[in-house]
Amino acid sequence: METEIPAMLAARQLIRPERFTFHSSRMRMKHVNKAELAAMDAESDRCALELSDAQVDVLGYACLVAIMSMGLGYHRESQTRLAGVTRENNAPAPVISSAGALVDGLKVLGAKRIALVAPYMKPLTQMVVEYIENEGVEVVVWHALEIANNLDVARHDPQNLPQIVAGLDLSGVDAIVLSACVQMPSLPAVAKVEAQTGKPVLTAAIATTYAMLKALDLEPIVPGAGALLSGAY
């Protein structure tokens, strides 16, 4: 959230007049497991309140798996509640979650069947798969990197991703989710994987950026950020 989304907004500033500032409030989490994710989500109201003090124009809830581990369809409940927190603070702002943004981004692309790469342990990745499938998108094939430590997720080399995707059976797949996690770097590999596979590629960070730009009523276009932000949608 604090690296790739600002990088995309900075890249957009090279081709469009709008300018952005980026503000963050952090929820604590060290190990990516269900207990820590639930504790993390419990801090989201505090974070929304703190950020609304700055009267920001849109809020993004970064952790996809924190939302998806709270139950099917939970992104709607979370977004509604957190937007209510901003209204109560007299600083109303739309709230985007990376979980909801990814699901919505896949629908914008018209993707019915997808391949997915995630850094999580297999049980959490399975939970993500079930969450996405509950939203009407079939996950045909998925790969879990099984990285338990949150900082190690951030250290994963995105240049490993093309080789990982090359090992997946992509027959019948409409799109590839190259990183189902805003924390795991993926942006430098997106164009390469699109060229390698001939399929649209999106990530949690790309989908979140798209949703934030739409919420701001700005053209959702970012150079070098894959099909969803190409300007075609």
Image (cartoon, rainbow, N blue to C red):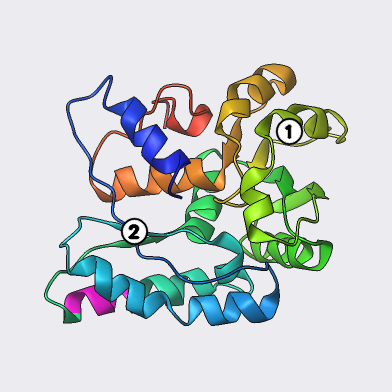
The boundaries of the magenta stretch are 82-87
Query: Does residue 71 appear anywhere in the picture?
Result: no
Left or right relative to 54: residue 33? right
Q: Verify CB contact (< 8 Å) between mark 1 and mark 2.
A: no
Q: Quadrant of residue 220?
A: top left
Figure quadrant of the C terminus: top left
Left or right relative to 74: residue 69? right
Residue 111 magenta-drawn?
no
Dot 2 alpha-carbon crowd within 10 angstroms: few under 14, some 14 to 19, many 20 or more? some
Rendered residue at 48%/22% (across/down)? 224
In the image, what residue type sits under mark 1?
Leu
Mark 1 highlights which residue?
161
Query: Helix, strand or loop at disc 1?
Result: helix
The residue sitting at the left extreme is: 90
The residue sitting at the top extreme is: 195
Rendered residue at 55%/54% (across/down)? 103
Residue 84 magenta-drawn?
yes
Residue 167: image x %, image y %? 88, 32
Left or right relative to 36: residue 141? right
